[in-house]
C-alpha cells in the first residue's frame, strides 16, 4: 500500500463508493480503491469532503496536513490502540535515570555507526579526506559508553554529525554544493530535500507510535520539550542515513532533480510542482521497495522497529535499533 500526496491547489478529495477520487473543478485527477491506501497527505489549499473523511477513518487511513511549502501541521487519524499499560511502562523507564541513559546510548551509538557505514561504503574517487573523518568519528564514538549524562551524549552526537556532514557533502557530484545542514528555512536544494525527507519520515514514525499507544512526546535521548514529539525523534535517528540521506544522494547524483525543480523565494529555496512530484514518487518507491530485513520496504521495517520497541519497554527485552550495513 502507498501514501497519496495531493499538492494540486484547489483539488478536492471525495468518496466514490469504495474508492477515493481526487478532482479539480469538473475533472478527475486520480481515483483508486481505498484498499490501496496507507495514508493521504494534503498540501496547502486542498479540500476533503466529510463523507471521504469518515470513510477513510473507518478504513484506518490517516490524513496528514502540510503547508504548501512542506511544513507538517498535523493529522487526522482513526482511533488508535488503548494500551495504557504501555504508557505506564514508558513513564517508568523514563523515570529510571540509568535505564533512560542506557537507552539513549543505544540510540546514539547506532546513529554514529550508520553514519560511519555511509562514509565507508561510498565509492570514493581518489579522495582521502573521508578517512580522517572516519578516524575522528571513531575516537568520539568510543566516548559513548562512558558518557554520564544526556548532555554529554548530545555533545558526542553533535560532533559526529558535524564531521559526518563534511564527508556527506563530498559525496554529491551534481549542480549543487552541500556545506552542512541549514534549515528553517533551508537555503539550498540539497537541504530542502533532506529536510522534507526527515519531515515525511518523522510523520510516519509518529503515526506508528501513536497507533501502538506510545506517548510520542516522551523520548529517552531527546528528553522532554514542550510541543516536541521526542520519541519520534529518537526513532528517526536509526533511519536518517539509510532512508533520507541515501535517497538524497540518488536524486541528485543521478540527476533525477535539477535546478529547474526548485524556485527561490527571497532567502529560501522551495521545490516547485514538478520537483515535488518527482520527490514524492521517489520517496514512495524508496519506502516500499524491498530492502535487507524487510521485503516490503522501509515503511514495514520502521513499523517492525516500533513493535520491537514495544516489546523492549513492556517486557524488558533488549532493544536492537536498525543498523545499516551498506
Image (cartoon, helix red, strand yellow):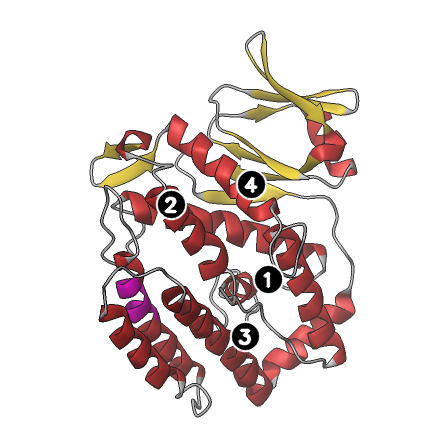
Question: As rendered, which of 68 and 302 lies closer to the eye?
Answer: 302
**Are the residues at dot 1 and dot 4 in contact (C-beta closer than 8 Å)?**
no
Question: As rendered, which of 53 and 202 lies closer to the eye?
Answer: 202
Q: Is residue 178 magenta?
A: no
- Between circles 1 and 4, the one closer to the viewer is 4
Q: Main secondary structure of the magenta part?
A: helix
Q: Of the two numbered discs 4 and 2 on the same chain, state the one appearing first in sequence.
A: 2
Q: Is residue 11 above or below residue 301?
A: above
Residue 88, given in percent of the width and then of the height, sits at 72, 74
Is residue 177 something one can see in this rendering? yes
- Between circles 4 and 3, the one closer to the viewer is 4
Binning the other alpha carbons within 10 Å of mark 1 as few (below 14), some (14 to 19) or many (20 upward) gives many
Residue 241, given in percent of the width and then of the height, sits at 45, 60
Question: Looking at the image, how many numbered discs can be counted on the residues?
Answer: 4
Magenta stretch: give its range: 161-167
How far apart, in angstroms, are the residues tagged by discs 2 and 1?
25 Å
- Between circles 2 and 1, the one closer to the viewer is 2
Binning the other alpha carbons within 10 Å of mark 2 as few (below 14), some (14 to 19) or many (20 upward) gives many
Question: As rendered, which of 293 and 274 lies closer to the eye?
Answer: 293
Q: Of the two numbered discs 4 and 3 on the same chain, state the one appearing first in sequence.
A: 3
Tag 2, which secondary structure? helix
The disc at residue 216 is 1
Which residue is labeled 4 in the image? 284
How far apart, in angstroms, are the residues tagged by discs 4 and 3?
29 Å
Q: Is residue 162 magenta?
A: yes
In the image: residue 326, left or right of residue 69: right
How far apart, in angstroms, are the residues tagged by discs 4 and 2?
14 Å
Amino acid at each position: 500500500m502507498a501514501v497519496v500526496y495531493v499538492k494540486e491547489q484547489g483539488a478536492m478529495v471525495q468518496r466514490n463508493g469504495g474508492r477515493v477520487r481526487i478532482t479539480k473543478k469538473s475533472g478527475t485527477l486520480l481515483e483508486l480503491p481505498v484498499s490501496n491506501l496507507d495514508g493521504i497527505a494534503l498540501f496547502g489549499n486542498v479540500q476533503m469532503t466529510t463523507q471521504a473523511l469518515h470513510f477513510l477513518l473507518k478504513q484506518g487511513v490517516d490524513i496528514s496536513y502540510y503547508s504548501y511549502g512542506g511544513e507538517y501541521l498535523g493529522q487526522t487519524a482513526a482511533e488508535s490502540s488503548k494500551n495504557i499499560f504501555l504508557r505506564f511502562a514508558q513513564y517508568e523507564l523514563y523515570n529510571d535515570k540509568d535505564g533512560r541513559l542506557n537507552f539513549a546510548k543505544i540510540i546514539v551509538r547506532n546513529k554514529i555507526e550508520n553514519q560511519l557505514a555511509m562514509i565507508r561504503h561510498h565509492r570514493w574517487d581518489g579522495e582521502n579526506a573521508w578517512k580522517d573523518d572516519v578516524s575522528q568519528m571513531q575516537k568520539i564514538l568510543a566516548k559513548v559508553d562512558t558518557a554520564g549524562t544526556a548532555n554529554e551524549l548530545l555533545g558526542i552526537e553533535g560532533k559526529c554529525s558535524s564531521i559526518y556532514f563534511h564527508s556527506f557533502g563530498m559525496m554529491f557530484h551534481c549542480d549543487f554544493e552541500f556545506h552542512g545542514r541549514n534549515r528553517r528555512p533551508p537555503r539550498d536544494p540539497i537541504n530542502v530535500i533532506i529536510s522534507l525527507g526527515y519531515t515525511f519520515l518523522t510523520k510516519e514514525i509518529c503515526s506508528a507510535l501513536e497507533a501502538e499507544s506510545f506517548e510520542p512526546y516522551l523520548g529517552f535521548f531527546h528528553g522532554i520539550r514542550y510541543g516536541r514529539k521526542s520519541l519520534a525523534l529518537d526513532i528517526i535517528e536509526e533511519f536518517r542515513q539509510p532512508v533520507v540521506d541515501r535517497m538524497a544522494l540518488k536524486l541528485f547524483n543521478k540527476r533525477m532533480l535539477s535546478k529547474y525543480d526548485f524556485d527561490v523565494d527571497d532567502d529560501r529555496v522551495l521545490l516547485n510542482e514538478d520537483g515535488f512530484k518527482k520527490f514524492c514518487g521517489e520517496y514512495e518507491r524508496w519506502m516500499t521497495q524491498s530492502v535487507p530485513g524487510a521485503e516490503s520496504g522501509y515503511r514495514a521495517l520502521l513499523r517492525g522497529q516500533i513493535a520491537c520497541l514495544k516489546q523492549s519497554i513492556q517486557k524488558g527485552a533488549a532493544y536492537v535499533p536498525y543498523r545499516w550495513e551498506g
